[in-house]
């Protein structure tokens, strides 16, 4: 569905919303049932990476809500196996460094 949306409309804010929502909903799904499929977790990590990419493409004022939601997803991912938490942290680190650098530059 996300791929179809990207082809049809490609709205950056819509893509950010869809990818972040996907990541959030994974945890709702996992709360109801277990999943022992490495491919499932790999897909989650890829979607988290896409969510970060689409979010960072937005104007700074639009990023904050999405980044707060992704931060929550990142924390939830730390409790999963399959290396998901580590992968989330690895993807988050460049963004964290970029934001810290921007804060020190603005100060």
Image (tube, rainbow, N blue to C red):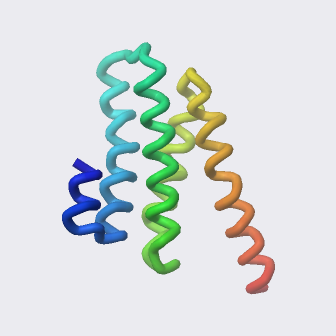
Relative to 36, 82 lies left or right: right
Total numbered badges shown on the rendered structure: 0
Q: Residue at x 35, y 25 (%)?
A: 31
From the top left corner, tell me how far across and down residue 48 is, in percent. Answer: 48, 46
From the viewer's perspective, is residue 105 above or below residue 95? below
- Residue shown at 44%/63% (left/top)? 54
In which image quadrant can residue 18 be found?
bottom left
Vertical relation: 52 (above or below) 101:
above
Q: Residue furthest bottom?
A: 106
Q: Quadrant of the C terminus?
A: bottom right
On screen, 95 above or below 72? below
Q: Residue furthest front?
A: 7
- Residue name at image x 62 percent, y 48 percent: 91
Please tell me which residue is depicted at 65% across the width and 43% down the height of the picture. Answer: 89
Give coordinates of residue 82: x percent, y percent. 57, 22
Q: Position of residue 92 (x, y in %)?
A: 63, 52
Residue 16 percent across, percent down from the top left: 38, 61
* Image quadrant in which you'd find residue 100: bottom right
Position of 14 with respect to 16 (left or right) is left
Which one is in front, 12 or 64?
12
């Amino acid at each position: 569905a996300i791929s179809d949306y990207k082809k049809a409309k490609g709205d950056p804010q819509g893509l950010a919303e869809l990818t972040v929502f996907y990541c959030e909903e994974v945890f709702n799904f996992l709360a109801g049932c277990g999943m022992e499929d490495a491919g499932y977790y790999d897909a989650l990590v890829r979607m988290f990476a896409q969510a970060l990419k689409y979010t960072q493409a937005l104007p700074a004022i639009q990023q904050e809500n999405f980044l707060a939601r992704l931060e929550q997803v990142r924390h939830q991912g730390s409790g999963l196996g399959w290396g998901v938490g580590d992968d989330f942290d690895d993807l988050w680190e460049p963004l964290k460094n970029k934001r810290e650098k921007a804060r020190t530059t603005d100060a």
